[in-house]
Amino acid sequence: MHHRVGVSEPAADSARQSRGSNYPPTNHLLRDLQAESVWISEGEFHVYAPMTPEVSNERGMTVGVMAAIIDFAGAQVAMRSVGGDWVATADLSYQPSGGVEHGPLVTSTKLLRAGNRVVVVRTEVFDGRGEETPARHAGSAVMTFSRLPREATTTRVAPMSFTIGERFGLSVGPTGFEGAATDALGLEELAPGSLLLEKSNYVLNSFGTVNGGATAMTLVAAAESMVGAGVAADISIRYVGQAGDGPMRTVARALAAYDSYTSVDVELLDTSEGDRVVALGTVGIVA
């Protein structure tokens, strides 16, 4: 299958438009997730995201979309812990305990450690079962973030609410996915497990590189493409470096198969810099 879905802008134009401008832009992955957030207390941050056909598969909400929301939630908690500094996702690991079958997705994120160089947070994932309450445990995630000086990004990021009990969202105007969430990324499948991701405004983060959630969704799509049958159940990602001009290319290989479970190793490479590794992931696929 050789096709491209969605619209991607050239990398250079995308970077110029993103750097020094408001983040996230109006048309962006984080806005289409339609998530809303609130600080429950000084140390606990909740995110609520609707369950729609565009973010679901036969097992419930897709792991790629959940990872994107988990990454966003973790970044908010990490950012609050570093004062005027900045953070970048270093790694993310999600393991399910049942998945989100009904929705909405409810996440609870707390700080585990804020050091001079590294911040560690944990997110518990719940299925609200029709309500915005943690009705049933669905999974757990742990993330680490690198602590960086504020000048690491020149992008003007829209301020997030740190007021306890004040709910906020990123949706501006008509948002939400028109088709499958991964289609919005503009992925092009070259061969099973080999996908191309253009560096467009839609997937950028505040550094002008590829957003951690978009990276997670791409790695999941590549793993599912390689196996050919089944959907992702879990994911672990190590973010190795920032994406250059791109496009990014995935390389996937099966590590092991156990009955209906296949473990897939996926790399995200920057083709503009000699296939430099941008991220490494291990995705579990369940048939």
Image: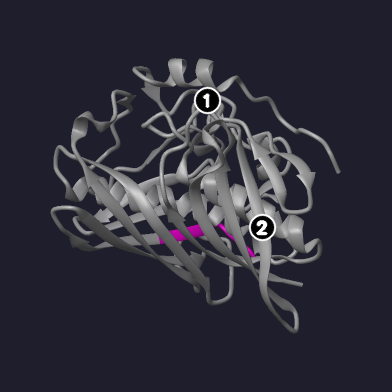
Residue 45, quarter of the rendered image: bottom left
Q: Which labelled disc corresponds to residue 252?
A: 2
Amino acid type at image mark 1: Asn
Residue closest to the far right: 1
Q: Nearer the viewer, mark 2 or mark 1?
A: 2
Secondary structure under the numbered disc 1 in the rendered image? helix
Q: Residue at x 43, y 29 (%)?
A: 24
In the image: residue 74, left or right of residue 211: left
Residue found 27% across the figure and 44% down from its top: 87
**89 lies above or below 96:** above
Between 227 and 98, the residue placed more toward the observer is: 227
Q: How many labels does the image show?
A: 2
Q: Is residue 116 left or right of residue 103?
A: left
Q: Is residue 104 magenta?
A: yes
Q: Quadrant of the N terminus?
A: top right
Left or right of residue 64, residue 126 in this image: left
Q: Cβ–Cβ below 8 Å for labels 2 and 1?
A: no
**Residue 240: percent from the left, percent from the top?**
42, 50
Image spot of residue 65 (x, y percent): 57, 51
Q: Magenta stretch containing residue 161, yes or no?
A: no
Residue 285: x %, y % from top left:
68, 69
Question: Horizontally, is 151 left or right of 214 in the view?
Answer: left
Q: Is residue 88 above or below residue 118?
A: above
Instruction: Tell me the element at label 2.
Output: strand
Q: In which quarter of the image is the C terminus?
A: bottom right
The residue under the point 47% across, 40% down is 211
Real-space Cα distance between discs 2 and 1? 25 Å
The magenta span reads 101-107
Location of mark 1 (residue): 201
